[in-house]
Image: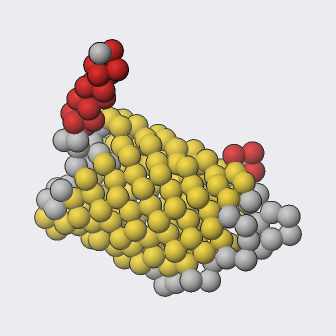
Amino acid sequence: MKYLKVAYLVVATLTAGSANAVSFHGEAGSEWTNLGMSFGANEPGFTFSGNWAHNDNDGDVASLGLGWNIPLGSVLITLGGKTIYLNPDDNDEGYAVALGGGAQLPLGDHFALFGDAYYSPDSLSSGVAQYGEANAGVRWKVSPMFSVDAGYRYLGMEGKNGNRDHIIADGGYAGVNLTF
């Protein structure tokens, strides 16, 4: 009976959190793509995310993230971390635990500036000497459910034990977001 009550409590907590908006996004740069989804990314409280980035010449990166959104006036600050699966071409697979955060600044009803950065040193990664990513851009909210992004993304890992560095993304991109 005790476990049943705990199960009900977990389901109730998850159900209460499911009112947060779900967002799906895709980005394309000159030689890379990034697909992701997030829960509660634009609201105060917990936010969850998942991403997959691919570069034909340098490999793949997949991540699961957890953050805490803190409103400071009109700015929404996110502090959190990601667990990252690394699959660079020509190197061994590995992992990283990256810490970081981001910010969103609305510019009226239809535009916003955003940015985030995450970093993992050698001590929190396997197969690479370090991992880092950064993203910054502007978002145009076309409708409550659809927005368009333009920005710059860097996502790379430094090789270890004589292996070469891998840059999954480094450059400008265009993206779209669907929010439900």
The picture places residue 5, in percent across and down from the top left corner, at: 28, 19
Residue drawn at x 22%, y 36% as measured from the top left: 15
Residue placed most toward the observer, 153 or 53? 53
Give the quarter of the figure containing the C terminus.
bottom left
From the viewer's perspective, is 49 left or right of 83? Answer: left
Residue drawn at x 25%, y 53% as measured from the top left: 22
The picture places residue 81, in percent across and down from the top left corner, at: 52, 44
Q: Is residue 112 above or below residue 8?
A: below
From the viewer's perspective, is 6 left or right of 168? Answer: left
Quadrant in the rendering for residue 19: top left
The picture places residue 141, in percent across and down from the top left corner, at: 20, 63
Q: Return the residue found at the far right.
A: 162
Residue placed most toward the observer, 63 or 153? 63
Quadrant in the rendering for residue 112: bottom left
Residue 128 visible at all:
yes
The picture places residue 48, in percent across and down from the top left corner, at: 38, 46
